[in-house]
């Protein structure tokens, strides 16, 4: 089953949605507030204009007919208030010149005198004044318009006042606000859905490109990105595909060159090794010549080992490395390698300590030659890089369903920043020791082919600890 690339929702997608949504939301809120304010101003203006027109007309009517006594004026106010046709929605009040309530369309008993500020303003300015706010007595939100009643003599005899609740207007304004808010929510939902769809159309190929680029970075050269887009993303994918193909081609040419060169070197190295051993068998050779031949033989063998490493590396690169698996006494193979290499290390002044145990270690399915190659390579690295500690520990034991082999040196260890890289091909790090830098890469590949793991870490107290875990059942 092909694993689909995982989308990075927390990166570009989150920033895009956050920025887009915030801008749209801000603009939407501004529009909602502007629409609501416009409707509120229109409704209140219309309502105030209506009350003002009513107050002006009524004021003019009373002012032109003030030719009666106070009792007659009072009775006229009472009659007009009680017969007012719009009293189910608007209250008509008559006040005297002291702002005391005389009559109201809400009943024969007028009630308490109102105390809104537009009444005194109408009395002092002799003009129609309006008030929008809370009723001081009830707390209800109202709109009131007061008009002075002026006699022909110029005397203000009272004030007529129209007052009504703004509940219906406030309800209309609230309805406009809720409607605008709902429209904004719908717009936001459409923006988010469309943006999410658009982003997925971008992030899906980007995720695939990222996943394939990571595979190329880890050595899977030649991997191709499948994309049907003809835009900038398609161009990026084509560029990476071309880069991957060229790197794969170069890697193939490099591997073929190394393989051919290694094969060509094996023949003269075999001749050099053979003749050096033959010449060393001559007992009549002087000491200087014998010492020179020993150096030639030692360096030829070292070069042969490097050539074999290169051959194994090229086999590993093109998938030709195979295992000859058989049931093997892994303890015996490891002990033979330790004892054989121990005698060589003792000549260099390095003590190889085998930490033996009475634990029963069963035979496991493996390729004994390949594993012996791994053991020798790790022991050789321990002597090269940790030989100054003059001691190497080796042990083998069982843990659950694995055979665990550990080799530790007492040298300076590996810098922490280099630990994740030491198993990469051609990596030598800060070490000044000669070598190709592919030995551990080959060892890691062999162990992985057995279904096991090879790990390197800095041991407590100094030195490097190499741990090989091999499953008991392959």
Image (tube, grey):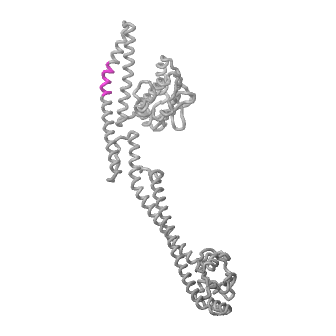
Res 451 quadrant in image: top left
Q: Is residue 380 left or right of residue 272?
A: right
**Majority secondary structure of magenta residues:** helix
Image position of 218 with respect to 116: above or below: above
Task: Confirm whether the magenta stretch covers residue 263.
Answer: yes
Q: Is residue 175 left or right of residue 72?
A: left
Question: x, y (%) of residue 64?
Answer: 58, 90
Res 90 quadrant in image: bottom right
Residue furthest out toward the front: 153
Q: Nearer the viewer, residue 158 or 88?
A: 158
Task: Confirm whether the magenta stretch covers residue 299.
Answer: no
Measuring 58% from the left and 80% from the top, which residue is drawn there?
Answer: 128
Question: x, y (%) of residue 275?
Answer: 33, 15
Quadrant including the C terminus:
top left
Question: x, y (%) of residue 417?
Answer: 49, 34
Image position of 121 with respect to 251: above or below: below
**Residue extent of the magenta highlight:** 261-271
Measuring 37% from the left and 31% from the top, which residue is drawn there?
Answer: 312
Q: Is residue 189 left or right of residue 236?
A: right
Q: Nearer the viewer, residue 257 or 269?
A: 257
Tally of numbered tags: 0
Res 282 quadrant in image: top left
Q: Nearer the viewer, residue 120 or 413?
A: 120
The answer to whether residue 373 of the structure is visible from this angle is yes
Image position of 369 with respect to 157: above or below: above
The answer to whether residue 326 of the structure is visible from this angle is no
Question: x, y (%) of residue 228?
Answer: 33, 53
Measuring 46% from the left and 65% from the top, which residue is drawn there?
Answer: 187
Measuring 42% from the left and 37% from the top, which residue is drawn there?
Answer: 449
């Amino acid at each position: 089953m092909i694993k689909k690339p995982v989308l990075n929702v927390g990166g570009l997608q989150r920033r895009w949605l956050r920025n887009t949504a915030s801008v749209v939301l801000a603009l939407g809120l501004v529009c909602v507030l502007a629409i609501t304010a416009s409707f509120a101003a229109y409704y209140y203006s219309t309502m105030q204009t209506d009350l003002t027109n009513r107050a002006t007309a009524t004021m003019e009517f009373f002012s032109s007919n003030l030719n009666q006594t106070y009792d007659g004026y009072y009775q006229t106010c009472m009659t007009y208030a009680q017969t007012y046709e719009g009293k189910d929605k608007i209250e008509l009040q008559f006040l005297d010149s002291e702002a005391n309530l005389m009559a109201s369309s809400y009943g024969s008993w007028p009630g308490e005198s109102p105390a809104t500020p537009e009444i005194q303003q109408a009395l002092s300015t002799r003009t129609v004044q309006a008030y929008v706010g809370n009723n001081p007595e009830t707390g209800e939100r109202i709109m009131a318009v007061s008009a002075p009643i002026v006699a022909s003599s110029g005397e203000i005899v009272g004030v007529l006042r129209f007052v009504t609740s703004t509940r219906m207007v406030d309800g209309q304004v609230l309805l406009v606000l809720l409607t605008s808010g709902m429209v904004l929510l719908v717009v936001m939902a459409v923006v988010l859905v469309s943006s999410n769809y658009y982003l997925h159309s971008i992030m899906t190929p980007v995720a695939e490109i990222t996943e394939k680029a990571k595979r190329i970075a880890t050595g899977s050269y030649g991997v191709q990105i499948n994309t049907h887009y003809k835009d900038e993303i398609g161009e990026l994918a084509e560029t990476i595909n071309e880069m991957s193909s060229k790197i794969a081609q170069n890697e193939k040419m490099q591997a073929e060159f190394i393989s051919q060169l290694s094969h060509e070197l094996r023949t003269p190295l075999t001749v050099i090794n053979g003749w050096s051993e033959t010449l060393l068998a001559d007992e009549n050779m002087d000491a200087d010549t014998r010492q020179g031949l020993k150096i030639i033989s030692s360096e030829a063998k070292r070069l042969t080992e490097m050539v074999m490493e290169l051959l194994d590396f090229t086999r590993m690169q093109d998938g030709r490395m195979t295992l000859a698996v058989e049931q093997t006494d892994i303890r015996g193979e490891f002990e033979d390698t330790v004892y054989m290499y121990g005698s060589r290390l003792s000549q260099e002044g390095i003590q190889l300590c085998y930490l033996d145990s009475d634990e029963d270690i069963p035979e496991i399915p493996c390729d004994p030659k390949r594993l012996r190659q791994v053991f020798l390579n790790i022991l050789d690295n321990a002597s090269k890089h940790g030989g100054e500690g003059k001691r190497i520990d080796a042990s083998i034991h069982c843990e659950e369903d694995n055979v665990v082999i550990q080799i530790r040196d007492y040298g300076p260890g590996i810098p922490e920043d280099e630990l994740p890289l030491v198993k990469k091909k051609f990596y030598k790090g800060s070490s000044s020791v000669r070598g190709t830098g592919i030995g551990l890469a080959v060892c890691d590949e062999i162990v992985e082919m057995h279904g096991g793991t090879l790990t390197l870490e800095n041991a407590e107290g100094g030195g490097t600890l190499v741990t090989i875990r091999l499953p008991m059942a392959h």
